[in-house]
Amino acid sequence: MGRIVSLTLGLALLAMVAVGCGDDEPSGPVKIGLALELSGAGAASGPLVEEGIRAAFAEVNNEVEGRELTVIVEDTASDPAVSLDKVRKLVESDNVDLILGPIFSNAAQGTAPYLAEQKIPNISIYQHPADITKDPYIYAAGGTLKDATYVLGQYIYDELGYRSITTLGIDYVAGWDFVGGVVQGFEERGGELVQQQWHPFGTFDFAPFLTTLEEADAIVVWPLSDAAPVLLRQLNEFGVDLPVVAAWAGGAVDEALLGDMGETAVGVHSVSYYAPLIDTEANKEWLESFTAQTGADPRGDGHFLGYRTGQLVIEALKRSGGSTDPDELSEAIQGVELDTPAGRFSFDDSRFGRQSFYIIKVDKVGDEYRHVPIREIPDVYFGF
Amino acid sequence: MDFLATSLLTALALGSVLFLLAVGLSLTMGLMGVLNLAHGALFMVGAYLGAQVAEVGLEFWSSAIIGGLGAGLVGLILDRGVLRHLHRRFDDQVLVTFGAIFILTNLSRWIWGSWPKIGHLPDYLAGSFLIGDYSFPFHRVVLIGVGVIALVVVLGLQKKTQVGRAIRAGLDNKEMLMALGVRYEAIATGVFVLGAFLAGFAGYIASPMMGVSLRLGLDALLLALVVVIVGGTGSVAGAFVGAMLIAFAHTFIAVYYQEFAMFGVWSILILVLLVRPSGLVSQTR
């Protein structure tokens, strides 16, 4: 009797140990959690990013270093509280090894500290505020919010000859920093900031802001995608004939939304990670293979950025030999360098990405409205 | 002076939209004692449906009517299919109609995607005219006109028709009305559907000003509730007074202190609840 009990106990103990060790075995799947804005104000980008990530993984048959890449997607609903809930779920219920996203900065400000505490590496996709890497394990591949828009601010002074600007941005951290970056670059060149206005989330009627607009050479806006078509039309309706600069293309003049905006968006200058119309062999090849693989015809930078993020993950796993130990994986991520259709990518020591940005102008190409890339500005990272 | 004029016109336009949105909710709450939280979602459904048919080339007003009819149909399903079984079960009505918001929002997302849409304006509505130094969109003036017509029509229905009289009587004493052989349930449903139609219609005609997005379901609901509570339930005049008051507060505060516009609106709500809780134009109960 005693021997049967101890044998059973021994077997049970062995079984528990085996199960407990199972997750650490380097031959199990790599679980990658995607916390993306699939609905709400960020819904213009989330689904494209997901498609890009999956395409990159599919290219390597969803396998790296003998381990299967498993993707678990959750919708953050473009809400910071929901984002944190979903990330918690991915970590605590789904036991992911790595989190990609969320896209929104106010959400990331909540999820980054949590993930650092849980020791789950987190690669972000789009830009974030400059202090996001104060927590470890976060790799802000998209750079800081001000990096790209700073060079746009310089461009509009140098090349477009504007000397004074008035701004109208959405009232949260991404609005402040996107517009703030333009203002910083512009003022450092000697330009004058005449007026700053901030509109609350959910504003659809911009009349109060447009009727109090002051005289300037140009207006800099950033309203988020769902209000952008309405804002551009209302600029017209209220007789605002200033040239329009969109502080950041995504969320103001998303290429995929240009069809709806039509003529109201033509002539708007902005800055982006990528434009499908980038005229290089590398880009044309990538577009061809991406379209063949997914059937999607990319507009804007969502697909590209998703694909690049997927490639980042693959390269990092190759470098770590398939290890998903948080520290080993983090070190591997830090060292990744990529040659992408939109230029070279690498991580700065600060764990922010260094990459090219493209000044673009909205114009009619054929019978479609597109982002026409005007200038590439490589190796951008300032850290403010 | 011109600046005041443009703000005044903007406030009147917003007030018209809010009136169309809220009148159905007000009558339903007063008449049937039913709180339909999905009312804002009906506004959204009208906007999406109208935008959809406009995209395939249908004319502006026809698109608005289609939007209204679609919202009316959803309203009919909601009333006959669900709410009639929840007579007097107030908590359940709140839960069910709140759930309906998410169902409708996600259905809209499923059909039309997460992209916002933009309302299409025909050329004769798309221009602007000058008020002194300021340019003002013509379409907003048209909204004011629609609001006035709607007010006259609905008030006329209420005061001059048999049905209107029945509604007013029902607000006072439903049981007596039914005892007199009036088909109260049918009238109540009719009011619900009419309110839904007006909300959907408003959703589309207001879309150049408010956009067509999934956010409308909740945003419109909040505004509608404030208007109804401030104006008083069960009253067309109340819905109108409430709509104008809220629209003016929102517009004029937004001009000077943009961040405080909603704060101002909610403050009015609190004030009314403290001082005159049955609403500004209330039926004595």
Image (tube, coloured by chain):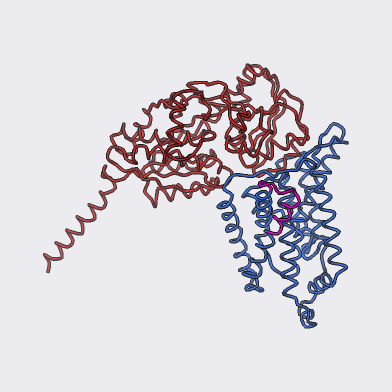
Chain colours: A red, B blue
Which range is magenta? B54-69
Q: Is residue A97 above or below residue A219?
A: below
Q: Main secondary structure of the magenta part?
A: helix
- Is residue A326 among what the camera can see? yes
Q: Where does residue A115 sit, x and y in percent of width and height?
A: 42, 42
Q: Is residue A222 above or below residue A91?
A: above
In the image, A36 versus A91, the foreground residue is A36
Q: Quadrant of residue A242?
A: top right
Q: Quadrant of residue A345?
A: top left
In the image, A18 versus A110, the foreground residue is A18
Q: Where does residue B156 sit, x and y in percent of width and height?
A: 86, 64
In this figure, what is the number of numbered marks?
Answer: 0
Q: Where does residue B71 sit, x and y in percent of width and height?
A: 68, 59
Which quarter of the image is occupied by the N terminus of chain A? bottom left
* Residue shown at 84% from the left, 60% from the top: B153
- Is residue B248 among what the camera can see? no
Q: Is residue B70 magenta?
A: no
Describe residue B217's horizontal placement relative to residue A8 as left or right.
right
Q: Where does residue B186 sit, x and y in percent of width and height?
A: 73, 73
In the image, B232 versus A6, the foreground residue is B232
Describe residue B83's horizontal placement relative to residue A92 as left or right.
right
In the image, A120 versus B169, the foreground residue is B169
